[in-house]
Image (cartoon, rainbow, N blue to C red):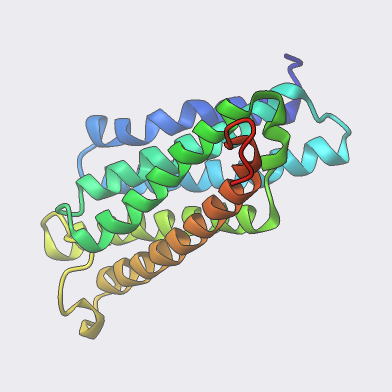
Amino acid sequence: MRWTVPNILTLLRLIAAPAVPLMFLYFSRPWADWAALALFLIAAVTDWIDGYLARSWQQESRFGAAMDPIADKAMVVIAIVVITGYSGMNPWLILPATLILFREVFVSGLREFLGSNARLLKVTKLAKWKTTTQMVAISVLFLGTGLAYVEHGRPPRVGEPGLPFSLSWADLATQVGLLLVWIAAVLTAWTGWDYFVKARPYLREPGHDA
């Protein structure tokens, strides 16, 4: 591995992923929510920066190509687990979260099975939009959990009935975040199906056409 700026940023994102839940271990709320939000936003921004710098400075590397998507998935998966836990296990969040987690495991398994043919599942523009939507949704939900703890003095319940009619900023952030999570889940399922279709020829038994 070359210690270039893009690679260092990617490595820092990998480290930041497990640091998100640690914020809730070492800080009291709502400071933990703000710290997790700040950490997640910084990681999301560096995701764009390291790719831009790698292309602009011609510092693209095998390490970056391998670790960049892993860092993205780690940030999203860990953050979703944390938010789901602090949401009161609301099904309106659990359902899209489950779909997102299933797709990430499914596609990772496909890539591992395909081995040298995994290049068929290269990242598409739609997949990039999917990742962006996931990160924006998670950021807004972290904002909602923090604001809800400040405004209500209690752990928030993501997707709580009646919230769309409230004037609370916390409720507004929570509902917007919940909507974005569902949009991200749809994009996630779409890209997962696209990857499955591309991998199907390699999943068939020898001598069978279907």
> Residue sitting at 69 percent across and 52 percent down?
124
Residue 87 in which image quadrant: bottom left
| Image quadrant containing the N terminus | top right
> Residue sitting at 23 percent across and 31 percent down?
25
Residue 9 in which image quadrant: top right
Query: Percent from the top left, x then y, of residue 207?
Result: 64, 33
Query: Percent from the top left, x then y, of residue 203?
Result: 57, 36
Q: Is residue 36 left or right of residue 26?
A: right
Query: Percent from the top left, x then y, of residue 185?
Result: 43, 59
Residue 26 in which image quadrant: top left
Where is 116 relative to 138, above or below? above
Instruction: List the single residue furthest toward the front.
Output: 207
Instruction: List the single residue furthest toward the bottom.
Output: 165
Q: Is residue 23 left or right of residue 28?
A: right
Q: Nearer the viewer, residue 54 or 80?
A: 80
> Residue sitting at 14 percent across and 53 percent down?
88
Q: Nearer the viewer, residue 195 or 172?
A: 195
